[in-house]
Image (cartoon, grey):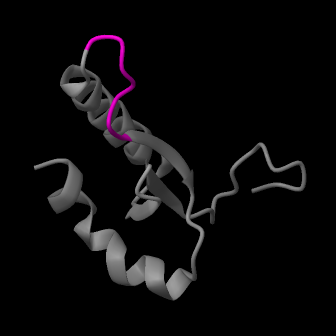
Amino acid sequence: MSEDDTTPSSTQLWAVHLLPHDEHHAAPTKEEADAACVLINAAASRQAEPGMPPPITATACPWPYSAASYTGTVSDFYTLFLR
């Protein structure tokens, strides 16, 4: 992120953050993280009881862990979210 923390840099690593489980899954790009979140949130909304919040919420966020851990897990993205 840039100094103002609003503009992603070209080296920013991205993730899909799942709540309430507090899980982070590495994503190849912000665009792909955003797309996966749209699909996850739509599916979760369909599963919610009327008047209740969805059981899970996905948001795209910067990868919170090391670059090494990102490299070791980003290859799982397509298997986890877009099969």
In the drawing, does residue 31 fall left or right of residue 8? Answer: left
23 sits to left or right of 46: right
- Furthest-right residue in view? 3
Magenta-tinted stretch: 50-56
* Residue 53 within the segment the image draws in magenta: yes
Q: Quadrant of residue 13?
A: bottom right
> Picture coordinates of residue 20 (x, y %)?
44, 50
Residue 50 lies, in percent from the top left, at 27, 11
What residue is drawn where x is 51% and y is 58%?
14
35 versus 60 height, above or below:
above
Q: The N terminus appears in which quarter of the rendering?
A: bottom right
Residue 78 at what x, y percent from top left?
21, 57
Q: Residue furthest top?
A: 50
Q: Is residue 71 magenta?
A: no
Q: Is residue 30 above or below residue 28?
A: above
Considering depth in this image, is 8 or 24 the residue closer to the camera? Answer: 24
Residue pushed farthest left? 83
